[in-house]
Image (tube, grey):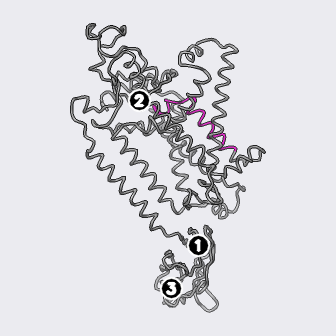
Amino acid sequence: MDKKLKKGKSQELESEVYKKHTKVYPREVHGLFARLRVTGVVTLLGIYYLIPWFTWGDRQAVLFDLPARKFYIFDWVFWPQDFIYLALLLAIAAFALFFFTAIAGRLWCGYACPQTVWTEAFLWIERKVEGSRQQQIKRDKAPWTSDKIKVKATKHSLWVLFSLITGFVFVGYFTPIRELAAGIVTFQLGVWEWFWLFFYGFATYGNAGWMREQVCMYMCPYARFQSAMFDKDTLVVAYDKERGEPRGGRKRTIDPAEKGLGSCVDCNLCVQVCPTGIDIRNGLQYECIGCAACIDVCNDVMDKMGYEPNLVRYTTEHRDDGHETHILRPRIVVYAVLLLVITGSIFFKIATRIPLELDVIRDRNALYRETPEGLVANIYTLKVINMDEERHSYRLRVDGLEGLTHALDGKVLEVKSGEVLDVTEDVVVDPINLKKTSSEIIFTLESIENPELVSEQKSRFLGPLIR
Amino acid sequence: MEKKKPHKAIAILWPSFMVAVVATGIFFSTFDPVEIYHISGDGFELSGLGHYTIGFFSFWLLGAVNGFLALYFLKPCE
């Protein structure tokens, strides 16, 4: 993006908007990109609203069970110990975003961002109730009448209802949704469920109903740094100035060349459809979310005028300057390589994942205890988590000190699938064998059925020094 | 550029919200709130989602306090 434009113009614009925000009334638009966006909206909202209703075996297919500290995603069960997967997943999402932004600009903003998706749904409701852009503007300027109150009340009721459903589904990702639905009908929901239902609903209503494009302009962190991923080969929505100027109104029958006019008929429709209320003809602007609504509407106009389409179109800075557009360029390669490496590592990690976790916690109350025989004992609390699909029996080994004995030696620990076993372990050593006040000992847990299921944990053994 | 109050509020609340989401994720994947409850011994009994909700809002509040102080100290002293 043009640096000068970014600094000068946008700051000026920003202070202007900060001073007085005027409501943007995006005009309805039809066309290729609008269809793509509607497809995106329906698909993404469909996924969001339907996924919690699927069952997998005897449980909800996707459930983030916070109280039980287990995340169910279809066949997988993730535990807090699997946080690394979430981190890797977020890294993949970030690099995918960088990658697609570098290639095709703000694809995410225009078609997939929840803000766009829900705003689109809210706009649809608004149009159904309030009518077209002109009708909305006219009504907002008109004084309050019973009819206006009725229309506004209807719109907001529908918005609130839609938001509450959204909030309900959100809670349904954390609390089994069928129980939740039953709880709502009978008014027997936990206070926190109610709270999140209303909180998320309120956020949806506020963001998609009222804040809309302001979220993109002032709140979105991605909008702030996305220009860093742009270069001269990135796809952007732009107006063909050469062809369009000088703009001006004219009759359809007139040959623009005779009148000395460009292809732009100055109908202003590109401004009216813009969800952020900018004029694409002023060049690249940071407010542009790349939704391509202006392309659709302008192509409609060009078609009616009998002109060539694509006066406003997806292009690159290089192509506009008459150069070649390079798809393969260093930054794309770097993003792609990073993306592949991280994706590869997550698959590797999942493939080699050992569904067994051992936590060793030293007793906090006493450093060590002396037995009547003069030996030193340390107490540990062991947590055995069986993350496998089947029940396992484990044996525990403790190594690291000479002549060490432990209470669980030779005992079999049985843990059901998905269960956590808490056991107390007593490790006893003759103080003669202690070289330091704190020595390292190693706990090794091994499955009897499958010796490949091994988990090792280090801990410390504390004791007095006898010299 | 002097910003208006609502925008200051957004500037404080929004970044702290995002940080709170991350902090809640990291914190609760390391510590089980039920265990913290057992260790501290007292405190009031909460249902499953309660711990997480209060944890999230505590992180949000802390972040917001931080943001507020940062904005406050940015003011020229006169």
Give the Cα distance between marks 3 and 2. 76 Å
Mark 3 against mark 1, which lies toward the viewer? 1
Count of number-bearing discs = 3
The residue lying furthest to the left in this view is: A323
Q: Which chain is home to disc 2?
A: A
Q: Chain of mark 1?
A: A
The quadrant of the rendering that contains the N terminus of chain A is top left
Instruction: Locate residue A84, reporting x and y percent.
Output: 47, 59
- Residue kind at label 3, given as amino acid type: Leu
Q: Which residue is mark 3?
A: A465
Across and down, in percent, residue A421 comes to: 63, 72
Q: Image point 48% across, 28% down: which residue?
A: B3
Using the image, tell me which numbered label, if any, was put on residue B12: none
User: Marks 1/2: CA distance?
Assistant: 54 Å
First of labels 1, 2 by sequence position: 2
Decide: is A280 above or below A399: above
Q: Is residue A104 magenta?
A: no
B8 and A225: which is toward the camera: A225
Residue type indicated by callout 2: Ala
Disc 1 target residue: A384
Can you tell which mark lies on residue A292?
2
Q: Earlier in the sequence, mark 3 or mark 1?
A: 1
What secondary structure do most residues of the magenta stretch adopt?
helix
Judge whether residue A166 can be spotted in this image: yes
**Foreground residue, A161 or A55?**
A55
Question: Is the residue marked by circle 2 packed among few (<14), some (14-19), or many (20+) residues within 10 Å?
Answer: many
Q: Disc 1 marks which amino acid?
A: Val
A219 horizontally vs A231: left or right: right
**Are the numbered discs 1 and 2 placed on the same chain, yes or no?**
yes
Tell me the SS state at disc 2: loop
Question: Residue B77 location, x and y as percent?
Answer: 46, 33
